[in-house]
Image: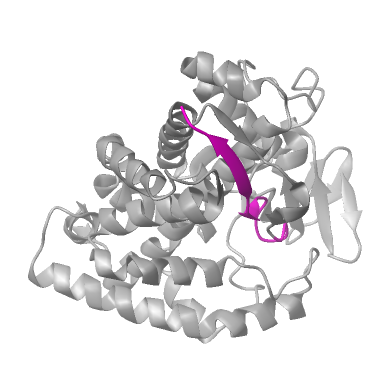
Amino acid sequence: MHHDERQGAWQVVDHASVSAILADPATYSSDFSSIAPTQEDFEVFVQGNFVGMDPPEHRKLRTLVSQAFTPRVVNGLQPRIEKVCARLLDGVADRDRFDLVDTLAYPLPIIVIAELLGIPASDHRLFQEWAATLFGGDELGEAPTREDLERALNAIAPTVREMNGYVLDHIRRCRKNPGNDLTSKLLAAEVDGVRLEDQEIVGFVALLLVAGHITTTALLGNAVVTFDRHPGAFATLRADPGLLPDAIEEVLRLLPPFAELGRRTTRPVVIGGQDIPAGAMIVAHLAAANRDPARFDEPDVFDPTRTPNPHLTFGHGIHFCFGAPLARLEARIALRMLLERFSGLRVPDYDEVTFQNPAVIVGVRHLPVEVAGP
């Protein structure tokens, strides 16, 4: 435990305490609506974004959405993900150098999510542009203040407004002519006679841009960087692709895309011998908990065979990441196809690699790689 005077928050870093905090939403609230900076256009997303909700509102939204976004729906995407990966990699088949993010890690999850929602192919580029603006972090420093956050919200507000209008129009089209897409299924989802409001669906679509896109983009880039920095990793995985799932989990442990989560105490608590008052800001550090030597042997070592691997990258408890199964599936398919297509894959110069702002997400923005044929 450490109290950060500048941030006015308690920093929690050990695995046991972070796990306990995430597992107790009654004591550690995810709702910061009363103290967070506000911006009119962002308010439209709040209704469907259950990441920032506590029970019972969280339970209602997540239950309704779960009716449409089922494990069967995610698993059924495998053939389409493979086709999208193949098409994207075909585009660089005659090249020995390309940017892995621009070519594969960035467009793949956006295309999959847009198709899943029933968005016309001609509009997929819009989703890519929106995501680039929402998660660029260009307005923020590495330790943003409240003023920084307010400035960033105002800067991206026009994009949020445009996205909100587009998604609402798409929802209305699906209501008139329902299909087999996720948007139509969200419109039909019902629990105890309650259905999702249009604006709640818009909020969930915005959430999917995070859960279904940016996590996968970061994971793919982080995986290639991690494998490249550990000689022999690519060769080992190419020889035995069955090791990929465990290797991906190890990348997630070492480089969680979202390194921390905020919570607010609803009552006085004691953590690590410290008395914490009600209403205090808690920062639960997933990245630090994932390297806690009390929980992981040799925590700073990349071990692609590590099992069990109880990392907290996707959270814990009722807020466990909704997009985790999709991110894992996309990563397995994309990395397997990279290994199959290229007998050689390396990052030739890390001076040419552009990293994301870690205050927003831990990942790479540009990742030039050199490849050799099968």
Q: Spot the residue most to the left.
A: 177
- The residue shown at (44%, 27%) is 340
Left of 17 or right of it: where is 25?
left
Relative image position of residue 343 (x, y in whole percent): 52, 26
Work out whether residue 46 can be spotted: no
Residue 102 in the image: above or below residue 134: above
Q: Residue 82's spot in the image, x, y percent?
A: 32, 38
The quarter of the picture where the N terminus appears is: top right
Question: In which quadrant of the rendered view does residue 93 lie?
Answer: top left
Quadrant assignment, res 7: bottom right
Front-lying residue, 308 or 51: 308
The image position of residue 165, as x and y in percent, is: 33, 81
Residue drawn at 52 percent across, 20 percent down = 238
Range of magenta residues: 357-374
Between 188 and 173, the one nearer to me in the picture: 173
State how many labels appear.
0
Residue in front for this viewpoint, 351 or 260: 351
Going by the image, does 168 lie left or right of 240? Answer: left
Report x, y in % for residue 285.
Answer: 74, 45
Q: Is residue 261 above or below residue 13?
A: below
Instruction: Examine the rendering and report whether any part of residue 6 can be seen.
Output: yes
